[in-house]
């Protein structure tokens, strides 16, 4: 299905990098929650526009995001008998953590970029017909530089690796950031993840099961 990228950094505003992300089949970059100064909010609005123009990443490509869905009115999404749980998308730019106050909360200081590919298959692991999407990690970029214009003028260090253990660890870390992330400019100063475990409408599901027609062993109803 094409090349995709999972990444993290303290901040991103590098024009060339953002344009390159828009050429991919999908991406998710998680960065530290930013202040609400006018200039910063202008930059965040630009990233929100990119979110509207790009596909993000399908949640069902990552098993660690299973059972989660975007909140509805700040509450867990309620799943009924005819709803699907795996249609969510994590948008291209996401934020994480705290807004700075007088104290110094932890910031997202890991500068990582994991390249891979999304794939599609028409059978599940047991060979039954199914619409299956997955992610295969391929190369990892580890760097001292944030994804910013100013980093191009600094003395920075970075390298590519295909070490299997590093790729696996980076994927687990980046997907956990996606799981706990928020909108690019959320109202909450403290962490308030957009995704939450779904709640099931047990009564509606039981009613649907009661109304269903069940075939006998001989094929009659």
Image: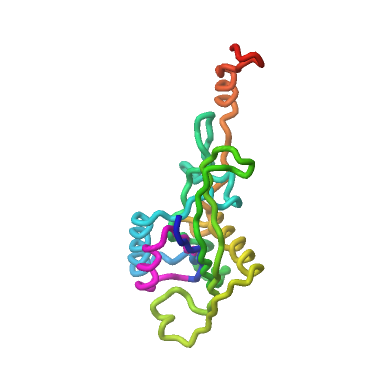
> Can I make out residue 186 in this image?
no
Residue at x 60% of width, y 63% of height: 173
Residue 28 is one of the magenta-drawn residues: yes
Image quadrant of residue 163? bottom right
In this view, which residue lies farthest toward the top?
220
What segment carries the magenta color?
11-30
> Can I make out residue 152 in this image?
yes
Task: Reply above or below: 12 against 95.
Answer: below
On the image, the x and y values in percent for residue 155 come to: 48, 87
On the image, the x and y values in percent for residue 21 come to: 40, 65
* Quadrant, the C terminus: top right
Task: Reply above or below: 179 against 87.
Answer: below
Residue at x 54% of width, y 52% of height: 134
On the image, the x and y values in percent for residue 146 come to: 47, 75
Residue at x 55% of width, y 38% of height: 129
On the image, the x and y values in percent for residue 169 come to: 64, 65
Image quadrant of residue 123? top right
Q: Please tell me which residue lies in front, 137 or 92.
A: 137
Task: Reply above or below: 112 against 196.
Answer: below
């Amino acid at each position: 299905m094409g090349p995709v990228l999972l990444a993290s950094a303290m901040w991103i505003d590098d024009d060339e990098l953002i344009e390159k992300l828009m050429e991919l089949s999908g991406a998710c970059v998680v960065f530290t929650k930013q202040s609400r100064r006018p200039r910063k909010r202008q930059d965040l609005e630009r990233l929100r526009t990119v979110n509207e123009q790009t596909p993000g990443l399908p949640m069902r490509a990552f098993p660690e995001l299973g059972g989660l869905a975007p909140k509805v009115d700040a509450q867990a999404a309620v799943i009924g008998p005819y709803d699907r749980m795996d249609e969510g998308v994590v948008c291209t730019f996401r934020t994480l953590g705290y807004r700075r106050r007088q104290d110094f909360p932890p910031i997202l200081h890991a500068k990582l970029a994991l390249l891979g590919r999304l794939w599609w298959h028409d059978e599940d692991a047991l060979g039954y017909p199914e619409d299956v999407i997955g992610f295969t990690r391929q190369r990892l970029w580890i760097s001292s530089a944030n994804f910013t214009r100013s980093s191009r003028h600094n003395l920075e260090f970075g390298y590519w690796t295909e070490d299997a253990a590093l790729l696996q660890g980076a994927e687990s870390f980046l997907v956990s950031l996606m799981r706990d992330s928020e909108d690019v400019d959320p109202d909450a100063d403290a962490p308030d993840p957009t995704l939450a475990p779904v709640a099931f409408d047990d009564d509606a599901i039981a009613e649907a099961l009661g109304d269903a027609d069940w075939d006998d062993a001989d094929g009659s109803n």
